[in-house]
């Protein structure tokens, strides 16, 4: 393709949230083997034909030239996503044969740790056949293209495309442009002041963080903890007893923070507090389809002093109150608003700035809980047994916990940079979380 | 404030939080069936504090009082 002068049709200005995600991508490329990528995995109850799937995927993704975009800066210095006229280049679908469930994780890990070949590749699909009886379809994606919910919605659209006899108009109604947000500066600066105050208050008790291995070639490793329907029901009942109606997220976070604290204790690692950065979706369920691409996340921060960690009731209350206070103070909106201001800064400079207040310790770990499932129960005539996410966690902290709910079952994935945890420590975390979530709670 | 006024205000607030049309929100449907999660529910509690000057996050969040708009309106009415 020759040089094209970008017009408003092929130019999508990045929001502040998108620029933060770009920053994380930059940092991860500096510190690990690849960028800020994640993977949605569909565990299927039978096998899918490679050629059939590839044809469908090529036709479907060709509807979205946006998936082959790249980032550049406009004359007004605002960064934007340059959308090509056509989705050029063949979509990558790689097939693997997996001799057994044991090797599946190695393969899935290999898929999500493989960097994209250039700056205009943001999606890759992997089909893993397990002993010719079951399979897994994994979609590896660049977080600069979409967030976790956007990725699930993209797969949901693919399901709809297959169900609707390959209707080429599936992409209709999804806007590919966005304003540059170059107005209301006072509001942005006031939001920035609020966010700055929040960061300063968090930095008063520096959070504990596990040391990050210095080796740049390091990959991420994963552990999936699955709960069956009965266990999931017990967990939700426990969450209700411990935290109240619809308070699953604070309950999960409490148990995870306690398991992480146990790990620090066993290592004799000193920490004054633990800090969890929790990414939250700022879209309502009504606008996900319209805001499928790019990032619509913000953050909540939960900090707990070490001396109260073992008191589950107190910790749960602290987390609930911190959630309430931050929502009331509008912190998630302020973060989104203030992050627009960061777009002026080149990424290497921005990296230096964010390291200052928390001395490089952004959080002890990252947590995210996707409570809604949007995917239909089958794809290409094959039943979906489970769906889970495998995100490469921004470094620092390089440790994250990601839960989702599918078909009445809760999944929790532990993601960590290779070398941060030993196998035994992963077992300790897994056992602590399982026991903490499923142990009987007093009513 | 009457019970009906409280219920109407709650529906208005929840419609804004969930970006749904108020007329599509039934007062007897449990919040989890409206697609509301922990964060959405906390947003509703913040809306209640701002509208009715009642802080409910520390009240135990019993299902009996918090599961539907109707039960929540009755609970607020009792507290006011």
Image: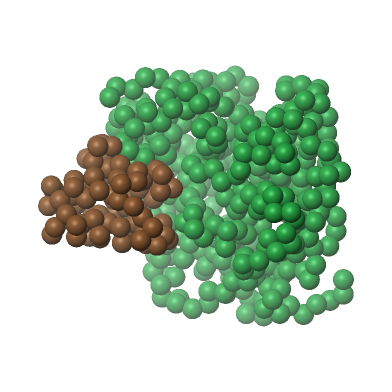
Chain colours: A green, B brown
Foreground of the two, A310 or A213: A310
Residue A53 on image: x %, y %:
80, 45
Residue A28, percent from left and from top: 66, 48
- Give the residue at the far front of this rendering: A165
Relative to A335, say whether A261 is above or below: above
Would you identify the image quadrant in which residue A32 lies? top right
- Residue A259 lies left or right of residue A116; in this view the side is left
Q: Which quarter of the rendering shows the C terminus of chain A?
A: top left
In-front residue for pair A261/A370: A370
Q: Residue at x 25, y 60 (%)?
A: B9
Question: Foreground residue, B13 or B25?
Answer: B25
Residue sitting at 23 percent across and 55 percent down?
A: B7
Q: Is residue A26 left or right of residue A3?
A: left
Q: Is residue A202 depicted above or below A127 in this figure? A: below
Q: Total of numbered circles in the picture?
A: 0
Quadrant location, the N terminus of chain A: bottom right
Kindly indicate the quadrant of the structure image that contains residue A216: top right
Q: Residue at x 35, y 61 (%)?
A: B22
A95 left or right, relative to A321: right
- State whether residue A165 appears in this view: yes
- Residue A268 position in % (x across, y down): 48, 23
Residue at the location (35% across, 46% down)?
A: B29
- Image coordinates for residue A405, horizontal then vertical, percent: 52, 37
Does residue A315 appear anywhere in the picture?
Answer: no
Depth order, front residue of B50/A376:
A376
């Amino acid at each position: 393709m020759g040089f094209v002068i970008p017009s408003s049709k092929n130019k999508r200005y990045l929001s502040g949230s998108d620029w933060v995600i770009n920053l994380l991508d930059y940092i991860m490329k500096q510190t690990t083997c690849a960028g800020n990528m994640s993977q949605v995995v569909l565990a299927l109850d039978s096998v899918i034909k490679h050629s059939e799937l590839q044809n469908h995927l090529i036709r479907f993704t060709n509807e979205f030239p946006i998936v082959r975009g790249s980032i550049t800066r406009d004359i007004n210095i605002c960064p934007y996503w340059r959308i090509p006229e056509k989705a050029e280049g063949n979509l990558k679908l790689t097939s693997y044969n997996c001799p057994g469930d044991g090797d599946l994780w190695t393969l899935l890990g290999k898929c999500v740790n493989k960097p994209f070949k250039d700056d205009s590749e943001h999606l890759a699909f992997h089909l893993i056949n397990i002993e010719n009886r079951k399979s897994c379809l994994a979609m590896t994606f660049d977080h600069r293209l979409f967030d976790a919910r956007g990725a699930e919605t993209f797969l949901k659209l693919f399901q709809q495309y297959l169900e609707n006899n390959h209707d080429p108009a599936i992409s209709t109604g999804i806007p590919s442009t966005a304003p540059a947000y170059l107005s209301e500066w006072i509001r942005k600066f006031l939001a920035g002041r609020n966010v700055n105050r929040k960061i300063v208050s968090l930095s008063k008790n520096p959070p504990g963080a596990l040391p990050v291995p210095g080796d740049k070639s390091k990959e991420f490793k994963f552990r999936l903890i699955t709960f069956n329907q009965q266990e999931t029901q017990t967990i939700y009942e426990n969450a209700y007893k411990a935290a109240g109606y619809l308070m699953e997220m604070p309950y999960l976070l409490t148990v995870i923070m306690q398991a992480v604290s146990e790990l620090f204790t066993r290592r004799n690692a000193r920490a004054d507090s633990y800090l969890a950065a929790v990414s939250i979706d700022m879209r309502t369920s009504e606008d996900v389809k319209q805001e499928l691409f790019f990032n619509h996340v913000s953050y909540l921060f939960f900090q707990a002093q070490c001396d109260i960690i073992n008191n589950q009731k107190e910790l749960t209350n602290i987390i609930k109150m911190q959630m309430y206070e931050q929502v009331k103070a509008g912190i998630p909106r302020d973060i989104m608003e203030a992050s627009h201001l960061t777009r002026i800064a080149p990424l290497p400079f921005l990296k230096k700035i964010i390291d200052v207040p928390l001395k490089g310790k952004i959080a002890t770990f990252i947590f995210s809980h996707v409570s809604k499932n949007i995917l239909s129960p089958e794809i290409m005539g094959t039943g979906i047994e489970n769906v889970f996410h495998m995100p490469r966690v921004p470094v620092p902290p390089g440790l994250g916990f990601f839960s989702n709910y599918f078909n009445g079952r809760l999944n929790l994935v532990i993601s960590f940079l290779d070398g941060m945890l030993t196998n035994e420590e992963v077992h300790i975390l897994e056992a602590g979380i399982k026991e903490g979530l499923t142990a009987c709670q007093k009513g | 404030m009457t019970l009906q006024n409280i219920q109407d205000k709650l529906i208005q607030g929840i419609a804004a939080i969930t970006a749904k049309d108020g007329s599509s929100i039934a007062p007897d449907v449990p919040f989890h069936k409206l697609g509301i999660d922990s964060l959405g529910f906390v947003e509703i509690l913040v809306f209640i504090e701002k509208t009715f000057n009642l802080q409910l996050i520390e009240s135990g969040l019993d299902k009996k009082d918090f599961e539907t708009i109707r039960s929540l309106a009755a609970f607020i009415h009792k507290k006011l």
